[in-house]
Amino acid sequence: MPELIIAVIVILILVAVWFYVGKKQHNQFREKAYAILEKHGIVSKNEKSTFFEFKDKTYEILFYKIAKTHELTINSKYIWEVHMKSRSTLINQMYFLKSELPKIVIIYPMETKIKRFINENEMEFIDYKDEFYNMRLVKLDELDQLFTEVIQ
């Protein structure tokens, strides 16, 4: 019985450390993104949203976490698909994308290419230069380039 209690305590400690490290990495990523955004414009936050003002235009900034090796496919404006090693998951983004403002969705820490269906039979690779559905999907290492090369 004491071994069971010790095992449960160890598992709880490991889970707490895992959540702490994940939250810390998430916060570090956001801080890096905010620093890049603040070089180019004004960042403002309220309880639930982050906004970015750049050259008389306001964008909503959204963060979307996808593991480094997973793949993202945009099936439609609201249906996104995350491909993992042995399975894939469809995600309804209707609530995530509900605002009418143009959006910059910062995808992290994903390193694979992002794909988008143009229609039922055609797919294309997209990057920070591509705008569709009133949004841009950008990886952190592309964020600075977005404002120096594309949105000027």
Image (tube, rainbow, N blue to C red):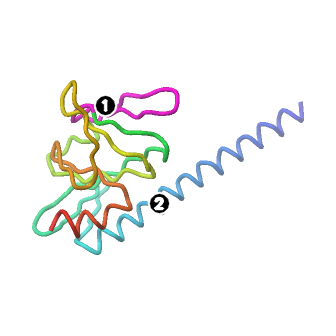
* Element type where label 1 sits in the image: strand
Q: How many marks?
A: 2
The answer to whether 23 appears left or right of 106 in the picture is: right
* Element type where label 2 sits in the image: helix
**Would you place residue 82 above or below residue 131 in this image?**
above
The answer to whether 42 appears left or right of 29 in the picture is: left
List the residue tagged with mark 1.
92
Give the amino acid type for the residue marked by disc 1 in the picture: Asn
For marks 2 and 1, the one nearer the N-term is 2
Measured as percent of width and height from the top left, residue 135 is found at: 20, 48
**What span is colored magenta in the figure?**
75-93
Q: Quadrant of residue 77?
A: top left
**Would you place residue 93 above or below residue 51 in this image?**
above
Give the amino acid type for the residue marked by disc 2 in the picture: Asn
List the residue tagged with mark 2.
27
Q: Image quadrant for the N terminus? A: top right
Residue drawn at (77%, 42%), measured in percent from left and top? 9
Q: Which residue is at the front of the view, 95 or 116?
A: 116
Residue drawn at (24%, 60%), measured in percent from left and top? 51
Residue drawn at (37%, 47%), measured in percent from left and top? 64
Measured as percent of width and height from the top left, residue 48 is found at: 31, 51
